[in-house]
Image (spheres, rainbow, N blue to C red):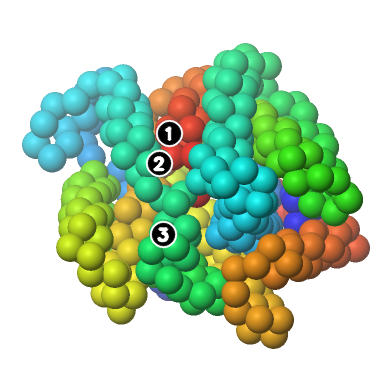
Amino acid sequence: MEIPAAFLAFALQDKWALLEEEEIPHADCNESMDEEGSVSHICGYKVSKSSIPYILFVGDLLTALGSGMTVKFFPLFFKNEVGLSPSSVQAIYMVVPLAMLACTMLAQKISVSFGRLQTIIAAKTSGIFLLVSLALLEYDHMKNAAIIVPVYVARTAIMNCTYPLDESILMDNVPKETRARWKALESVSAFGWCGR
Amino acid sequence: MKLLRRGALSTLVSKPESRIMVSTNVYVTIALCLIWGLADSIWTGTVLAAWIFQLADDEDGHANSVVGMVEAAMGLSSLFTAIPVGYLADKYGRSPICKVGGIGFLVAVAITVYAIEASVSTHQSLVLLTIAMSVWGVSGGIFNGPMQALFADSIPKGDRSYWYTALMVAYTLPSVIGPLVAILLFRTYGDNWTLDQIKRFLLLDWYWKFLPLFWPSLFKISGRY
């Protein structure tokens, strides 16, 4: 699988990218800007365009550091604590992407009407609430798979469904000549998270 | 890919008004995510963690910390590579850096296959897996930032949430297949967490990684604008 992916890496070309002036805003840019394009009005607050990537990065980093301590060990939690068989754990990981896709598409639709940032805030708040619920269930020794698994699936789907919105806001607000640097900074978050 | 071109996704998400045809870079990136979604779902998810856990448990009983250390090797190597590479990609262009990352992935595949298939001691397997994960991390650190920057560079502002949703669909949808294959395998050979069971699954995955080499149509993606 990784071998054709490695060869496809050679197909990407800088010459096929758009020029800066070709990036004409429309469609999902429902966050307004001033005439010079340096200040955005998001959720009623004035935010300088240059500060948006920093705000996104800090939010992303905090989320990653928090979930990094738990996400990678969920399979082992299901195996050792909940006592699920290998095929049951795999069934959970089969349902998670489907739930995530449904939530991603829903989030994109909602964002067109209510705004990308509003959608992200609502989703992250719901995800954190579900994670806390999961911790409380474990704390109360309620290791019943019928309760824990749906909460886990919903948490994972909702927390991860805003990725397209996060990325589109980031890339809309960083100059073309610094995009690779900003994407590279995500590695700091990825390290905190330690992979998917 | 055909589904995306015909706009099947647009019935499910809000499609940008102006275009469904974008740069070739966008389609290549989506194809890459499609492949990675499948590969990641098979080996970097549950089964890899369980495999390392079982190996480490046999070795010295500190299995949880070993799982964390091997996984951390990937994250740490990616962390130290990505930031300087991001600067280089902004300065000298994204596609040359992507090619270096592609070579790194081939090296990582070779080390990982050797770590799993070679007849070596448990300790050596763990060391080799740690090295393999580090090379995956370095290659990912080299490749991911420039690839995603190029993806963003190739989409007009205002269309990005649509294409990032398409990218996420491409990565997430095939990741259902990995667990499905695992269920079938565990149901066939015994539904328990033994080293032999997990090893059988990992090896099956590595054998079928070579099949797409004979799928030349992947390399003929075209249609710039």
Residue B166 in picture, x, y percent from top left: 51, 58
Q: Chain of mark 2?
A: A
Amino acid at dot 3: Phe
Alpha carbon distance from label 3 to label 2: 14 Å
Q: Amino acid at mark 1?
A: Gly
Up-down: is A134 above or below B114?
A: below
**Residue contact at pointers 1 and 2, CB within 8 angstroms:** yes
- Tell me if B48 is positioned left or right of A117 in this view: right
Using the image, determine if residue B149 lies above or below residue B45: above
Which chain is indicated by disc 1?
Answer: A
* Upstream in sequence: badge 1 or badge 2: 2
Position of residue A115 measured from the top left corner of the image (x, y, whole percent): 22, 49
What chain letter is assigned to the residue under label 3? A
Q: Nearer the viewer, mark 1 or mark 3?
A: 3
Q: Is residue A88 left or right of residue B3?
A: left
Which label sits on residue A68?
A: 2
The residue at which mark 1 appears reads as: A192
Q: Which residue is mark 3?
A: A77
Mark 1 residue element? helix
Q: Position of residue A118 (x, y in %)?
A: 19, 48
Can marks 3 and 2 be said to lie on one chain? yes
